[in-house]
Amino acid sequence: MVKRGSGGRIRNASVPPAGRIAVVTGANRGIGWAIARGLAERGLTVYATARDAAAAAAVIAKARSPALRLIPHQLDVTDEHSVEALRNEIETKHGRLDVLVNNAGAYYDARQRASSADIATVRAALEVNLLGPWRMCVAAVPLMRRGRGGRIVNVSSGAGSFADPESGAPAYSVSKAALNMLTVKLAADLAGTGILVNAACPGWVRTRMGGPRAPRTPEQGADTPIWLAMLPPGGPTGGFFRNRRSIAW
Ligand code: NAP
């Protein structure tokens, strides 16, 4: 059930977007890039991260707008030292974090079957799609607790829904189902703090993962994650959304 978040101990609930600091993982391409650019266009300062430092740096050229506050930074969500380095930089430079979008995802194992899955692939999918976001949340929450009410958006998938048992990609689907449960647990844990935690399915999107036949653009896929990242105080928490509407777990 989707709950409403309380205002928590928010000292200034109307912090303008220009004052907010955001991190987007896997921001060098696909939906992550559309989310990072979309948040920057709304005035946020966005750490556009990528596991390859050169790919992160290239986002500035990709933006083609020096006015956007995009800060490239290396980040591999499976590497705790990499996560720690980003956390330290944000703490030193800003003292807090307002938005975390756990977008990075991998291992869409469409050719596997659950009954014959390669367990090493399952483990790798869990590393990127579950433990990576979890590690990011553990690093981010202390910075979010510093007064303004944070927003955590976990980019999940309908493939991780128990309402969709037919879809293949078993390692990917199980990892996204676990990410959904993490969303519920975090939202309950952080109830009353002003930090809102939600999961989003972007739909089927034309990216390297989604392939060329997908009907949606990355910008369309980014819409619901951006909406969740910009929720006002008292917005929903512990929910799963597509097209800005609650969907079945
Ligand atoms: P994509 O184009 O394949 O992009 C995936 C991004 O994740 C890339 O930036 C990739 O970086 C990054 N990444 C992978 N492993 C990482 C790691 N260990 N640390 C940091 N970054 C890592 O896929 P997409 O379609 O944009 O997917 C974005 C999110 O949407 C994913 O969570 C995906 O599961 C979800 N989703 C997508 C669809 C769809 O139809 N496309 C549908 C439902 C859900 P590199 O460039 O270094 O590989």
Image (tube, grey):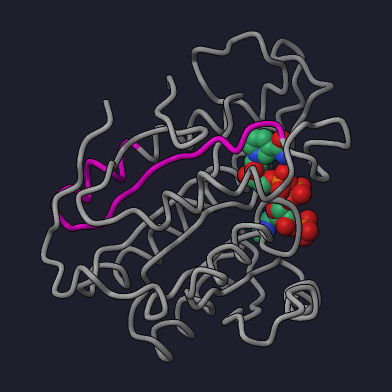
Q: Is residue 201 above or below residue 96?
A: above
Q: Quadrant of the C terminus?
A: top left
Is there any visible trace of residue 106 in the rendered image? no
- Residue at figure coordinates x 88%, y 37% from the top left: 212
Give the mark count: 0
Q: Does 247 sit left or right of 63 as displayed?
A: left
From this viewpoint, is residue 134 visible?
A: yes
Relative to 75, 28 lies left or right: right
Seen at 39% across and 58% down, the residue is: 230
Q: Residue at x 61, y 79 (%)?
A: 70
Give the answer, above or below, for where 54 lies relative to 66.
Answer: above
Where, by quadrant of the figure, is residue 221 drawn?
Answer: top right
Q: Position of residue 121 (x, y in %)?
A: 74, 35
Q: In the image, is 81 to the left or to the right of 61?
A: left
User: 162 above or below 246?
Assistant: above
Res 194 → quadrant? bottom left
Q: Where, quadrant-wise, is the N terminus in this rendering?
A: top left
Q: Position of residue 172 (x, y in %)?
A: 66, 31
Q: Residue furthest bottom?
A: 93
Does the stretch in magenta take in 194?
Answer: yes
Residue 139 covered by magenta stretch: no
| Residue at screen point 59% across, 43% down | 129
On the rendered structure, is 220 left or right of 94? right
In the depicted view, which residue is nearer to us: 91 or 247? 247
Read off the magenta span.
184-204
User: In the depicted view, which residue is nearer to us: 28 or 17?
Assistant: 17
User: Looking at this view, is 87 or 198 the one in front?
Assistant: 198
Residue 55, image x and y in percent? 79, 72
Across and down, in percent, residue 224 comes to 51, 44
In depth, the one of 227 and 196 nearer the eye is 227
Extreme right residue here?
212
